[in-house]
Amino acid sequence: MTIVNKNIKNKIFDITYKSVLIIIGSFLILMFPWYIDDLIILDTRNVFYIFTTMFLGIIPSIIGSLSTLIIGIIIDGLSINILAEAFYVIIPILVGTILKHKFKKKNKFLDYFITGIVSNTLSIFTYLLIIDYSITSLDFLLFGLIYPVIYPFIVLIINGYTENEHLRKIVQENNIIIESTLNSVKYIEIYAIDVNYNYLAFNNHHRNQMKKFYDNKLIIGQNFLELVTNNKVKNRLKENLDKSLSGETNTIVIEVSEYGNKILKETYGPIRDLKGIVVGVCVYSEDVSEEYKKRAEIEYYSKYDSLTGLFNRNLFEKSIKKLNDISDISIIYFDVNGLKRVNDAFGHLAGDKLIKTVSNEITSMLSMYEAKIYRIGGDEIVSISRTLTNVDKLIKDIKDKLFNTKIFHLPISISAGHAIKKSDESFMDSLLAAEELMYVDKITNSHSIQKENIDSLIKTLHDSEVETFEHSNRVQRLSNNLGKMLNLSFKELKLLDLISKLHDIGKIGIDQEILNKPGKLNKMEFQLMKRHCEIGYQILSLVYDYSIIANDVLSHHEDFDGGGYPRGLKGEDIPLKSRIIRIVDSYDAMTSDRKYRKALTKEEALKEIEDGLGTKYDPVIGQKFILMIKKEAI
């Protein structure tokens, strides 16, 4: 509604000010008459109203002329011939309207000349019908011949000026639009040169790039090639510009080391005049480095595994059809043992490191055989090569090398199976045969390998932490004595010994800076330290011989009232052997020197145990433990 009202107000204002101009013009004509002689006055309002109708519009002309007539009546009274004056106004306005809307022929001079004769004839004829006046030869000459001849020149001059002004505005507006359009493209250089390589136009981005690389301030008419100081770039540009000047449109994608190894997409198009002659070249230069980088990444990851750099499963599946037609090829199917447990115990970054270490070693050992190696699953790697000799020794060498390459103090273990594809077999059948042999290898050897892994971890932990080794021995002795007081069976006592020995094995996965910190741990460090229970559980779950105690190790920091970790178990939901270790572990920790405090006396430690009965510690087991320590002290 507001926009409509505003448009109406603008239109009213436009009509009003044009009408006022016409009124002022009419009075100026009347105030300064053109005397032909002492008796004859040339009333040029006739011409004036035609002009105003043509160039200012019919409505302002009618309002202006009638207002002039009314004002004249008010000033002179009824002494003037109102009817003659009215016709003298109406006829020019009609003629001006016809000229504005109807005459659009090529011969405008003739149109305006005829219009002048008709206009003057009608005006004079009408005037004579109303008033008594006799036409002289001078009137005929002026109104019938001279005036109609002068009139077209005046109209054409005004028309020409108006049209030129209109065209000038159109050109100016078009130039602004073109310049705005060029500069709206912020990341593409656009410039045009003539046949002599001089600038015809350029956008801001091109100006900025030339300033950046050549420290030039551009102006229209400058020679573009003279501004390019790098000869290699200049020769490339000139070659492509010359192609376009010969009429050829060409697009190139090129890596430009001079601009920081950017990839540019340049399009050169000839500029032609109305006759089709090439008068210049328009160049579009776009930095497509990111686009091509992403395209290269997409192409890379369609073939390669992002973690290891091996060929991926997608390419493997595409290769199967071709492999069906090839005979006598060796297939080795590898599987990384315990990847899930490593992920669970040490985190996925550790699992990633394990996979990369295995893939790098397999690639290194098989490189001389020109093998194609694919990662076809999370922990599965397949090697395809020409027929190999002494494959068993090759696989053993790979296993031994990996076993001696430890990750988080764990020897790396893999299983492997080998098959040879014959001409009468499909590739998938041979692959399945290699996979079955890999599973046989895993079942046969995994038990001993995993036990070796745990034993290696225990040795590593005790070698690196003498304090941990001594602590485990003391906990083992005290736990065994307490177990006997609780009437545990021989088997349970042996398991308790094993738990005592391995309850801190998860610390192998904790950062050494946290383990060896001289002061108390902060909140975040303590949260990380608490993870050693879960890490120990994951490690021990790997081996059947130790999996039976994994849950006890997991729970050895649970509190009797449910306030412990990692699961917040309560009361007898906590395994019995874990409750025993909880008390003994705490007592030994309190009575041993730490980097951040001195050891408590036995009496002080027992007081702490007693105060924690029913909250941290099982009250029944705790009472027996206190009694046992007091007896030992006697």
Image (spheres, rainbow, N blue to C red):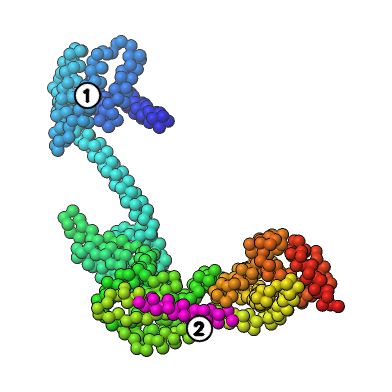
Q: Is residue 202 above or below residue 231?
A: above
Residue 266 on the magenta segment: no
Give the x, y percent position of residue 237: 29, 69
- Residue drawn at x 64%, y 64% is 566
Is residue 152 shown left or right of residue 208?
Answer: left
Is residue 361 shown left or right of residue 150?
Answer: right
Is residue 588 shown left or right of residue 194?
Answer: right
Question: Which residue lies most toward the right here?
Answer: 634
Q: Quadrant of the N terminus?
A: top left
Mark 2: secondary structure: helix
Mark 1: secondary structure: helix
Q: Residue 51 shows which numbered tag? A: none
Overall secondary structure of the magenta section = helix
Residue 453 on the magenta segment: yes
Q: Nearer the viewer, mark 2 or mark 1?
A: 2
Give the x, y percent position of residue 434: 37, 78
- Residue drawn at x 52%, y 79% is 447
Nearest the eye: 170 or 260: 260
- Say which quarter of the image contains residue 133: top left
Is residue 509 shown left or right of residue 616?
Answer: left
Q: Identity of the amino acid at label 1?
A: Leu
Q: Report which residue position mark 1 lands on.
A: 94
Nearest the eye: 124 or 266: 266
The boundaries of the magenta stretch are: 433-455
Residue 600 visible here = no
User: Tag 2: Cα neighbours inside 10 Å, few (<14), some, or many (≥20)?
Assistant: some
- Residue drawn at x 42%, y 84% is 395
Q: Is residue 282 above or below residue 455?
A: above
Q: Quadrant of the C terminus?
A: bottom right
- Residue drawn at x 49%, y 79% is 446
Nearest the eye: 424 or 491: 491
Q: Report which residue position mark 2 lands on.
A: 403
